[in-house]
Image (cartoon, rainbow, N blue to C red):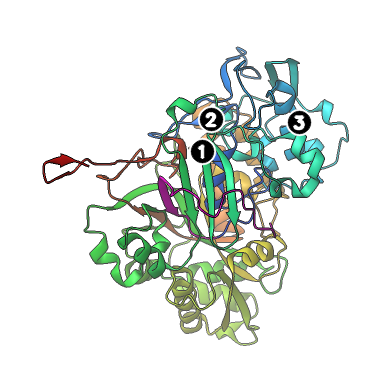
Amino acid sequence: MGVALCGCSRHEPPADLTIVNSTEPESLDPALIVAQADMRIVQGLFEGLTRLEPVKSQAVPGLAESWEISPDGITYTFHLRTNLVWSTGEPITADDVVYSWHRALDPMTASRYAGQLYSITNAEQYNTGVIKDPSLVGVKALDKYTVQVKLKSPTAFFLDLCAFPTLAVVPRQAIEKYGDHWLTHLPLPTDGAYELGEWRLNDKIRLVKNPRYWDATNTQSAIIDFLPTSQANAALNLYENGQVDVVWDKSLIPPELLDVLLKRPDFHSFGYLGTYFIRFNTTRKPFDDPRVRQALALAVDKQRIVERITRAGEHITSHLVPDGTQNYTPPAGLDYDVERARKLLAEAGYPGGKGFPPFEYLFDGAAGAGGGIHQSIAIELQQQWRDALGIQMNLRQVETSVFWGMQSRLDYTLSRSSWIGDYNDANTFLGMFVTGDGNNETGWGNPRYDDFVHEANETVDVKKRANLFQQAETLLVSNDVPIIPLYIYVGINYFDTNKVQGIWANVLDDHPLRSIRKVVRETKVEGREQ
């Protein structure tokens, strides 16, 4: 997005709610976004057949008011609400759903999340170019208000997928008229609780309540402003000065103040399904050798990282899928073992680190941000690997938007990474490392891993499914090691519960905007209510 959108007058009304939302969005196109910060905004603008309720983040009716599932779990028949219209007044029909899903799968769209639709018959084949005819994909409009979906096999979390932004219904009329620039033309047709009021690059994004949304009467705030900043001190100052009401993300708390701030009642800590890890570009030498990757994994003192840097009660992990994921117990990966790490590095041809080429570690953050979590972890890893293995890692910090592009193009050697569960199932973590998945971004692939994941997702038996996922994860974190898991996230956000309501801690760290509102307290001054 290279154009600032301005849809409000110079004397615009104040926002009902102002949120600091980390970085500037890379996009607001549901088919293209991957970052959590982008998704928070997009979920206010566009909705799917289902949506997530705010307390437990469970899928409930969205654009579809009801559905039936066939006894074999293969066929879903969704019934759209008959009063659905775009924010610009045109009717929303079953054809819009089919178009949106076909678009997300179209190879020309280049959606990194297209794999979210792969449980649908022929979806993967269409996305990978094996078949060219989108009508062969198992989603059809039976009539104006009925959508039929045929799955390859029963998928326990399919209704959760229908609430994910990639499967949101988007405005065909705007996309076909304006092409890649459809988001830059206002008024933008939306089907969510909000419309896009304006987007001033590196300033703010304003969302305005959509009066034509099917559930508009329950949308709590009329105007929400999002302020992008990756500077923790700036975010805290805005909050303390009363200029913002909510700050998402632990990264927006100054690390040196973390111990003190976590004792305050307006700083909220909670566990959720998120993992911080390191990616290897396995196409670059010497990291094409799994012994090298194992050696680096074994030489990381993760406890030192969570005690000295993150300091919010994070749990170190040797596996990718967080503990507490529904119907799954992850296998142990590689623990801290410097002697074994040195032995493996010597076996790979680099005894004591001799001959090991200097390499680069990529991480993101605002230029000169200094002291950020990603930077501090990078410096710690640099020292640990130099001391334990005798190897030299150079650090490269880039702006977040640049970072995402470099990682997706494999234009890196090692990079900081994280993953937040899209739904409460092991597949949301393990499915992205299937060969060729748009979110793999390591250059790694293993046919055995792919088979385990695919078979797991075609298995109804809960225990058998978990066992297959465990075998896949063992390949990922113990054998081939294209990633190094570091710790399981602890979520932190800050807002005053006496002033802001509608935010609940949940395992997906998902907070629908439509449910959040600022509470206006009446105070008495000189005997009069104000």
Nearer the camera: disc 3 or disc 2: 2
- Is residue 135 toward the left or the right of residue 54 in the image? right
Picture coordinates of residue 512 (x, y %)?
Answer: 46, 38
For disc 1, the neighbor class at 10 Å (few under 14, some 14 to 19, many from 20) is many
Image vertical order of residue 280 relative to residue 378, above or below: above
What is the secondary structure assignment of the residue under circle 1? loop
Amino acid on which disc 1 is placed: Tyr
What is the secondary structure assignment of the residue under circle 3? helix
The one of 345 and 414 positioned closer to us in this rendering:
414
Label 1 to label 2: alpha-carbon separation: 29 Å
Q: Give the range drawn in magenta.
A: 1-23
List the single residue furthest toward the right.
Answer: 132
Q: Which quadrant is home to the C terminus? A: top left
For disc 3, the neighbor class at 10 Å (few under 14, some 14 to 19, many from 20) is some
Nearer the camera: disc 3 or disc 1: 3
Q: Can residue 106 be seen in this view?
A: no
For disc 2, the neighbor class at 10 Å (few under 14, some 14 to 19, many from 20) is some
Label 3 to label 1: alpha-carbon separation: 24 Å
Amino acid on which disc 2 is placed: Pro
Dot 1 or dot 2, earlier in sequence: 2
| Magenta stretch contains residue 381 | no
List the single residue furthest toward the left.
Answer: 527
- Is residue 406 toward the left or the right of residue 276 in the image? right
Residue wearing tag 1 = 423
Residue wearing tag 2 = 211
Picture coordinates of residue 82 (x, y %)?
Answer: 62, 15
Residue wearing tag 3 = 99
